[in-house]
Amino acid sequence: MTAAEHRSAAATAAAATDLAPHELRILVAVDRERGFSAAAKALGLTQSAVSHSVRGTERKIGAILFERGRKGATPTPAGAAAAAHARQVLRLLDTLAVEARGAERGAITGPLRIAAFRSAVLHLLPPVLGRLTTRHPGIAPEVYVVRELGAGTAGEVAEGRADVGIGTISSTLPVPAGLIGDVLVEEPYSLVHPVGHPAPRSLPLVDWHENCGSSTRRWWAGQDWIPKATVLTEDDGAVLSLVSRGLGMAIMPALSLSEAPDGVEITDLGPDRPTRSVGYITTPELASSAAVRALIRELRAARR
């Protein structure tokens, strides 16, 4: 066999194990819908076509991707990992096409998926996205709120569901392996209490699940005047509403206080006050895309 024939045979063998885009889309649909029938309906295919494709994908990968059962299809650990990579690959393929068309027209276009925690969506992103879409009308931001618990916004990026995450970054909550990011703003915590209260530190504490990370909690533990929370809410807006009605005090970061209601007073906690680092997180591949670069430029400009 000649060298050319060897190369041709190797290419043919590789092609037999490569996953095609349509196989990746079916894999992602089954993972999302948690069932072959539901995935088939979503894709406009027959159930047998979806099942055949997944079996072929499993043979190529060499692992079982879904546990089949009466309640549908549950991804195995291999399936969850494969679906995350499939979403990222499909996104890069979309980016390839969008950026090639944009380059031809000299414009930055296409969707830009952003996952952010609530106060960032309310107070940090609106002016940033306003400037971004004014400069680049072809960009279509898609923003959704993700709680900063567990994997948080970084998890959405790692799973291929978001192009950029806006979340908290610290020594105890670093950018996950395989992703990149940077701190945009260090926001201080303040004491928040009803206006004019003579002894705000004597009030009961109102808190919410996402409030702060372990480093801030350690600061709290060293403050003997901060009691255990007597009211725990779902978000910072509920905390501010309760405090404004005289039902307690809270320790809150600056973003949450951007539009504090009447009836709330904000008191500096002094030079040793804790801070929260807010930054962006993306993948190394998407960091080079035009839309993500444009967003990061606007985010950095906003912190100046």
Image (tube, helix red, strand yellow):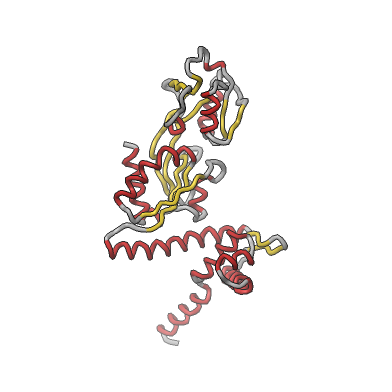
Query: Which residue is at the front of the view, 120 or 160?
Result: 120
> Which residue is farthest bottom?
1
The tally of labels here is 0
In the image, taking residue 107 as reference, residue 91 lies left or right, namely right
In the image, taking residue 194 as reference, residue 38 lies left or right, namely right
Q: Answer yes or no: is residue 272 visible.
A: yes
For image coordinates 52% across by 49% down, the residue present is 155
For image coordinates 32% across by 57% down, the residue present is 108
Residue 244 vertical placement versus 174 (above, below) = above
In the image, taking residue 43 as reference, residue 297 lies left or right, namely left
Question: Which corner quadrant holds the N terminus?
Answer: bottom left
Residue 158 vertical placement versus 149 (above, below) = below
Query: Which residue is at the front of the view, 158 or 36?
Result: 36
Residue 240 percent location from the top left of the image: 51, 28
Residue 160 percent location from the top left of the image: 49, 56
For image coordinates 55% across by 67% down, the residue present is 43
Residue 52 lies in quadrant: bottom right
For image coordinates 28% across by 63% down, the residue present is 105
Question: Which corner quadrant holds the C terminus?
Answer: top left
Residue 95 lies in quadrant: bottom left
> Which residue is farthest top?
198
Residue 174 percent location from the top left of the image: 48, 42
Query: Which residue is at the front of the view, 82 or 228?
Result: 228
Residue 25 percent location from the top left of the image: 52, 66
Q: Answer yes or no: is residue 78 visible.
A: no
> Which residue is farthest left?
106
